[in-house]
Amino acid sequence: MAKRDYYEVLEVAKTASEAEIKKAYRRLAMKYHPDRNPGDATAEDSFKEAKEAYEMLSDPQKRAAYDQFGHAGVNQQQSGAGMDPGEAFGDIFGEVFGDIFGGGRRGGGRQVFRGADLRYELELDLEQAVFGHNSEIDITTLVECDPCGGNGAAKGTTPTRCATCGGTGQVRIQQGFFAVQQPCNRCKGRGMIIESPCDGCYGQGRVRKSRTLQVKIPAGVDTGDRIRLSGEGEAGRNGGPSGDLYVEVAVRKHAIFERDGADLSCEVPVTFTTAALGGEVEVPTLEGSAKIKVPAETQSGRMFRLRDQGVRPVRGGSRGDLYCRVVIETPVNLSSEQKDLLRQFEATLKGDPSRHNPRESSWLDGVKSFFGSK
């Protein structure tokens, strides 16, 4: 009976990725496994067919040969047609649990492990966060050992395949229906035995090293934002990919401005005379300075809004505003003459306090009403 096309067996396209092939195989294996279909010879044949197709298409070299020559280019002795279904089912559980709990994946006959992700906290000035900045950071992390190329063996030697686990780094323990995989005790999950360890990394394949990295900070970032540097984390093991580096932004407190999302705010001291008579006041902005017109009889705490003088958000959107809160400054270090002039001025206000000091008058009326009700 002619063999079916492997892509047809797994129900995937010929352009399917490794992850798509793996997902399709898991689905079929769980569906047709003999333990779930006792006495069903058709299901067992479908299971073996799916296993054979997966083993062929999950290996890049075998898949390339199959794509070029079809079944004629396949070495049937390496297929999974004669494999024990229980062992295959154990492989499925091992791969599933490995993905969930951070285990390794197989590559080149042994398990490979992705390197750990790293976190770095970068402090920025407000101006750097608002307008963007190129920063240099120094990190210390595990990188691939140069003398041994990451395999952990001394120069002139190579690791040998572990005889206990067959180079997979895992041993299978069958307990009835379930098969559980665990790291091999002999090779500690590496799948290889190193007889002569490398002097640089002592057989670990990785060494700790300090590096300087360039980080481009986009304009508009704020405290808590993260910048991902792909592949700049710890080096993987057994040829696995490196982890990522996450740079977390922390914006320092500014001497003048406070930030609230896209908006900025600041306090603007105004003299008593300017508040009473009105005038122009110069206020700072992140890009220089601007002037606000203070009307006569301005009270302390009044807010003035300068449009588009805030922050443009890093994720897009309109630029924020700058809010300036007026704080009337009381004169200090007065001379005797100045004090006398203020007393004379105050005396002129007492004739009609409700006219000149409306807030004070209404407040006093409220106090009298409060105590009068007691």
Image: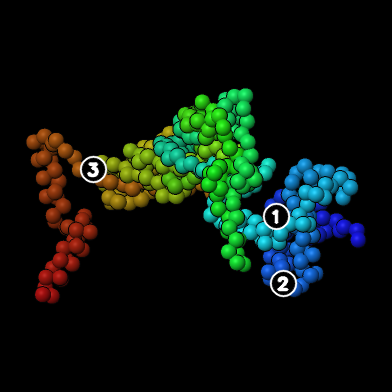
Of all residues, the one furthest to the front in this rendering is 163
Q: Nearer the viewer, mark 3 or mark 2?
A: 2
Residue 314, position as x, y percentages in the image: 53, 45
What residue is shown at x 78% (from left), y 64% (from top)?
Answer: 46
What residue is shown at x 11% (from left), y 40% (from top)?
Answer: 339
Callout 1: helix, strand or loop?
helix
Going from N to C along the chain, the mark reached first, 1 or 3, is 1
Going from N to C along the chain, the mark reached first, 3 or 2, is 2
| Direction from residue 207 to residue 268 in the image, left or right | left
Q: Residue 295 — which label?
A: none
Residue 123, position as x, y percentages in the image: 41, 38
Mark 1 to mark 3 CA distance (whole Å): 72 Å
Going from N to C along the chain, the mark reached first, 2 or 1, is 1
Callout 3: helix, strand or loop?
strand
Q: Nearer the viewer, residue 196 or 4?
A: 196
Q: Nearer the viewer, residue 357 or 197?
A: 197
Quickly name the residue at label 2: 37
What residue is shown at x 79% (from left), y 45% (from top)?
Answer: 62
Q: The C terminus appears in which quarter of the rendering? A: bottom left
Quickly name the residue at label 3: 329
**Within-10-Å neighbours for mark 3: few <14, some 14–19, many 20+:** some
Residue 232, visible in the rendered structure: no
Residue 11, position as x, y percentages in the image: 79, 60
Mark 3 to mark 2 CA distance (whole Å): 86 Å
Task: Please say if the residues under marks 3 and 2 sit with CB atoms less than 8 Å apart.
Answer: no
Mark 2 to mark 1 CA distance (whole Å): 22 Å
Which quadrant of the figure has residue 144?
Answer: top right
Q: Amino acid at mark 3?
A: Glu
Q: Nearer the viewer, mark 1 or mark 3?
A: 1
Quickly name the residue at label 1: 22
Which quadrant of the figure has residue 39?
Answer: bottom right
